[in-house]
Amino acid sequence: EADIYQTPRYLVIGTGKKITLECSQTMGHDKMYWYQQDPGMELHLIHYSYGVNSTEKGDLSSESTVSRIRTEHFPLTLESARPSHTSQYLCASSGQGWTEAFFGQGTRLTVV
Amino acid sequence: GNSVTQMEGPVTLSEEAFLTINCTYTATGYPSLFWYVQYPGEGLQLLLKATKADDKGSNKGFEATYRKETTSFHLEKGSVQVSDSAVYFCARTSGTYKYIFGTGTRLKVLA
């Protein structure tokens, strides 16, 4: 059983609001990831981190920002939410070597 | 380039039918390969993996063999159940930090 948690599971928020999506893992993994999943199912990497104080932009440009101050915590922030940010956001982590990624249950964000 | 290509869905099968979902990859080197499953409203769960050529990953009746010569990692199950209805993703490692996912294949199993 993977120990990676995302909160909230569902969020409906108005345009212009600032939001933070939380992601925590208790496995001591050094690598963490944020994916955006569109309704067509495809996963798009928007941010990743390979350790504390390291963050990188992913393959899909995103207006969100991330931070990695602690190993276990990798929050994603949107300063001003827009309807185009409506999506499913998935957090993942992985350990040393060629190991698999473990995923959280996701946050379904709706911006109205 | 570096990519993962899997068959488009949806795939609709009757219960107890044989399942194959094709997956091929391009890579320089020898990536690890994975199949993930996603149930509605959930994140991805690892279904099985293989880390080197000729490895066979298996779990819950699903199997996939790492074929270097055909750069493939096809998912199979001998007898599907209604509870197998989900979206299946093929994936590979990329470099040291990343994963590349296929576009997903939706499976629907009818009773």
Image: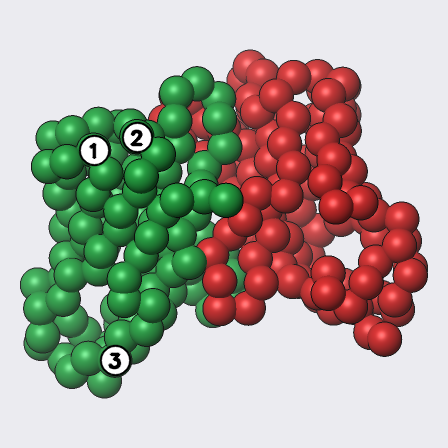
Chain colours: A green, B red
Alpha carbons under labels 3 and 1: distance apart: 28 Å
Q: Where residue A104 appears, x then y in whole percent?
A: 39, 52
Q: Are marks 1 and 2 on the same chain?
A: yes
Of residues B20 and B79, the one nearer the viewer is B79
To which quarter of the image does residue A28 belong?
top left
Alpha carbons under labels 1 and 2: distance apart: 7 Å
Q: Amino acid at mark 1?
A: Thr
Residue under label 2, please give it.
A28
Q: Residue at point 66% right, 46% down?
A: B6
- The image shows residue A87, relative to residue B35, as above or below, that is below
Mark 1 belongs to which subunit? A
To which quarter of the image does residue A107 belong?
bottom left
Residue under label 1, please give it.
A71
Q: Earlier in the sequence, mark 3 or mark 2?
A: 3
Q: Where residue A60 appears, x then y in whole percent?
A: 31, 49
Mark 2 belongs to which subunit? A
Label 1: state its secondary structure: loop
Q: Earlier in the sequence, mark 1 or mark 2?
A: 2
